[in-house]
Image (cartoon, rainbow, N blue to C red):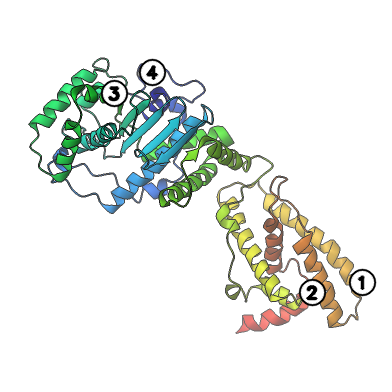
């Protein structure tokens, strides 16, 4: 991907100076919304600045919180790369921890990304381990012929600062001091390497990889390098993503949409890293997932979450629920009770999410439940008339089973036209039965009163 496309996202001030904003994309000022997963990030801290900002071997160890933040940053930035690539077509792949932190491959080029999420004010000098660890990875890839520099872009993205006059400053896409100057950057890097007294194993390995390249190879490598400093941190990157989500589903639903997109993407990356058969994310796959989740937020639809569909529920945890007592009164068997508990748990959870995320219109859920009660009442009254007042218990149970079978097999009332998941209806009926607004046994109200009142008195 051309640096102008993603760099303008990541650096709405300094990096965009002199660079045209990509056609069809939002200006940075339009992309300032609260991150949907900022509660995660707030529990972690910035990556710690290394003591002396050099490879002295005395740098502070990363704390678990800082490492976690770095991994989240990597995943979020990879998602951002996917979203940006989606504008260019579908012939691309994105992977993490492949050739680099992020590897994006398209027909035109291969992009390798090194990401450094650092505390505000962290400086990437010519002796910085962030810089030399990155150069080591890329130099080793050149030596081992793992990359073709003719078609590879190498990005070093840091939330820290590259001081003016440092080697990295001559490798930025645009700089206040003048144009890029790879020859000057090479000179400064060779000087830093020659003057270094670092003795750590990491420093020795970094310099050994650099030394393995001749001067022409080093220069050709640097010609492919783009240093992007003062980049967006993890919170700001989330705001950029939410801005893109607002374009897809509107501002009202942007947060809920992005939470689901990120949830899928994170799980997808975990599967890829675990080697369970998932390769890189492809453009076709990402477009399909993006489109599916966007469609769930259409005015005639509501999202059904995959983790909700996987819920099963435990009957033992619900035996005292009124809806379970109602099923027992009707003589419903254990297998069907298990399915009822499953549907109840799914509907309760999904409806709670819709409410908590403000995805429902005012009065929508109440109106939906009134429809369900009306449809039930028509059938219940017919059943009561057919039975009469002197029906035997066996007859009442037989008719109750028929009424409940209608709920299981035929009752499919959609809360919205596009939301056709069966458990929304069947589980909502269990919730209504739990509130005694509907029932299956012809005499359910009196029977439940006899069952529940003694229990309430204990």
- Between 175 and 130, the residue placed more toward the observer is 130
| Residue 131, quarter of picture | top left
Q: Earlier in the sequence, mark 1 or mark 3?
A: 3
Specify few, some or many for label 1: CA neighbours under 10 Å numbering under 14, 14-19, or 20 or more: few
Left or right of residue 196: residue 113: right
Q: In the rendered structure, find residue 172 and report the number of the disc placed on it.
A: 3
Q: Are marks 1 and 3 in contact (CB under 8 Å)?
A: no
Left or right of residue 275: residue 371: right
Q: CA distance from mark 1 to mark 4?
A: 79 Å
Instruction: Confirm whether residue 81 shows in the render.
Output: yes
Q: Secondary structure at mark 2?
A: loop
Q: In the rendered structure, find residue 386 and report the number of the disc placed on it.
A: 1
Q: Are marks 1 and 4 in contact (CB under 8 Å)?
A: no
| Quadrant in which the C terminus appears | bottom right
Q: Are marks 4 and 3 in contact (CB under 8 Å)?
A: no
- Nearer the viewer's eye, disc 4 or disc 3? 3
Where residue 423 appears, as percent x and y from the top left, is 68, 58
Where residue 325 appears, as percent x and y from the top left, is 69, 76
Q: Earlier in the sequence, mark 1 or mark 4?
A: 4
Which residue was labeled with disc 4?
A: 19
Q: Are marks 1 and 2 in contact (CB under 8 Å)?
A: no
């Amino acid at each position: 991907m051309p640096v102008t496309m993603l760099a303008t996202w990541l650096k709405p001030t300094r990096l965009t100076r002199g660079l045209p904003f990509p056609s069809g994309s939002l200006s940075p000022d339009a992309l300032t919304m609260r991150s949907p997963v900022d509660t995660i990030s707030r529990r972690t801290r910035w990556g710690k600045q290394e003591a002396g900002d050099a490879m002295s071997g005395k740098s502070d160890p990363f704390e678990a919180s800082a490492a976690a933040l770095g991994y989240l940053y990597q995943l979020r930035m990879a998602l951002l790369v996917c979203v940006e690539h989606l504008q260019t077509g579908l012939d691309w792949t994105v992977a993490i921890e492949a050739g680099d932190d992020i590897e994006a491959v398209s027909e035109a080029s291969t992009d390798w990304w090194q990401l450094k999420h650092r505390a505000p004010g962290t400086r990437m000098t010519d002796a910085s381990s962030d810089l030399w660890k990155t150069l080591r990875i890329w130099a080793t890839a050149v030596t081992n012929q793992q990359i073709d520099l003719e078609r590879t872009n190498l990005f070093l993205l840091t939330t820290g600062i590259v001081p003016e006059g440092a080697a990295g400053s001559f490798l930025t896409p645009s700089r206040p001091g003048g144009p890029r100057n790879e020859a000057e950057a090479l000179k400064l890097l060779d000087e830093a390497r020659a003057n270094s007294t670092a003795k750590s194993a990491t420093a020795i390995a970094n310099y050994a990889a650099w030394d393995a390249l001749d001067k022409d190879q080093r220069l050709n490598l640097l010609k492919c390098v783009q240093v992007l400093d003062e980049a967006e941190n993890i919170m700001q990157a989330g705001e950029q993503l939410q801005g893109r989500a607002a374009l897809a589903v509107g501002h009202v639903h942007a947060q809920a949409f992005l939470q689901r997109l990120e949830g899928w993407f994170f799980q997808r990356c975990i599967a890829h890293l675990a080697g369970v058969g998932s390769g890189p994310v492809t453009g076709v796959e990402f477009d399909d997932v993006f489109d599916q989740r966007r469609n769930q937020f259409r005015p005639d639809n509501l999202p059904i979450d995959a983790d909700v569909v996987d819920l099963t529920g435990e009957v033992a945890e619900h035996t005292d629920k009124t809806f379970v007592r109602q099923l027992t009164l009707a003589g419903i068997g254990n297998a069907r009770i298990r399915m009822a508990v499953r549907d109840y748990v799914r509907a309760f959870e999904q409806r709670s999410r819709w409410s908590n995320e403000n995805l429902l219109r005012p009065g929508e859920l109440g109106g939906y439940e009134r429809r369900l009660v009306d449809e039930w009442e028509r059938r219940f009254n017919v059943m009561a008339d057919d039975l009469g007042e002197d029906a035997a218990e066996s007859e009442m149970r037989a008719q109750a089973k028929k009424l409940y079978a209608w709920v299981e097999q035929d009752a499919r009332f959609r809360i919205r036209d596009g939301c056709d998941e069966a458990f929304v209806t069947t589980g909502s009926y269990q919730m209504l039965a739990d509130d005694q607004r509907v029932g299956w046994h012809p005499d359910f109200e009196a029977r439940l009163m006899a069952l529940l009142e003694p229990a309430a008195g204990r």
